[in-house]
Amino acid sequence: MIQNVWRSAAPILPLLLAATLAHGQSACSSDDQPAPTLLFERFINADCDACWRDSNTAAAPPKALVLDWIVPGSQGEDAALAAAASSDALARLASQQQPRPTTQSQRSQAVANWPGLTLRVAHGPAVNNYVGMSVSLTLPANSALAWPLSGWVLLVENLPSGTEGSPRPRNLIRNALQPLWNKGQALSNQETISLEDFRAMSLPEGTKTNRLQLLGWVQDAQGQVLAAASSLCPKEETSAPSDQTR
């Protein structure tokens, strides 16, 4: 899914990047935002309509990067939450060696905030149901990390509490990609290593573009989360408060 989105969106990428530059003052980024200290992920099986409305849904811990995944269910397109389900949720569970929940599950993972490592995410306005995004990683060249580094970059829709009966605000996953960074040919006299990725991400039908946010993190080869980041749009574009790090 991730690769297919990239190939189909490639022709429109120059337009998206140009739009982002043209709207430089309104671009949304993680600049000056507090660093999350925890990944907090909720997984709901698309068959379980009641799970979305469950009054016992766990609240997000402080300083957490909150993610709400809808996992494809056994009922396929007939599932109650099928319209919001994503195969990326299955990929995420597989990466954690976790089973698909029959109803719902949650998982937390600490963010190390590795010294000297900086992660930045940014996105521009939606153009023809695509959003141009960038993710950059800077770290000391002599960092004793377990390479290769990989990450997740997620385009989410901020849904306020009460949406379709949800007792909690949600950061519903709308699209995802997974950058993979190798150390490359770092020169011995380099003080830092800088890695970047630019992509175009598609928006599912019905996504409210004024509620979009970009979330991401980078991890080492052992699965340790090194850093995380979340974008914030200018005040005039900010939607209703969401259950997330601000």
Image (cartoon, grey):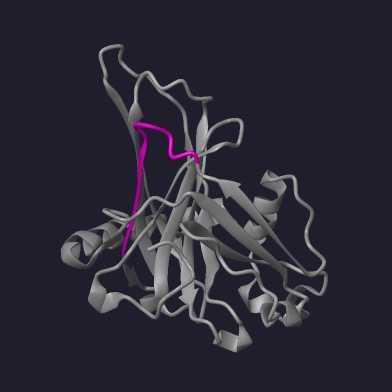
| Residue most extreme to the top | 188
In the image, residue 95 lies at what x, y percent? 67, 45
Residue farthest to the front, as pictured: 62
Q: Quadrant location of the C terminus?
A: bottom left
Residue 121 point in image, percent of width and height: 36, 52
Which quadrant holds the N terminus? Answer: bottom right
User: Residue at left 29%, top 68%?
Assistant: 233
Q: How many numbered marks are there? A: 0
The residue lying toward the viewer, choosing from 178 and 102, is 102
Q: Position of residue 150 (x, y in %)?
A: 51, 38
Is residue 199 or residue 44 the one in the foreground? 44
Left or right: 156, with 53 as reference point: left
Give the left or right position of residue 206, taking residue 139 as reference.
Answer: right
The vertical placement of 180 against 72, above or below, is: above
Please tell me whether residue 5 belongs to the stretch shown in magenta.
Answer: no
Q: Which residues are magenta?
A: 112-124
Q: Position of residue 29 (x, y in %)?
A: 30, 58
Relative horizontal placement of residue 78, taking residue 121 as reference (left or right) = right
Seen at 73% across and 73% down, the residue is 46
Q: What residue is at 62 percent from the left and 74 percent from the top?
A: 84
The question of residue 113 being in magenta is answered with yes
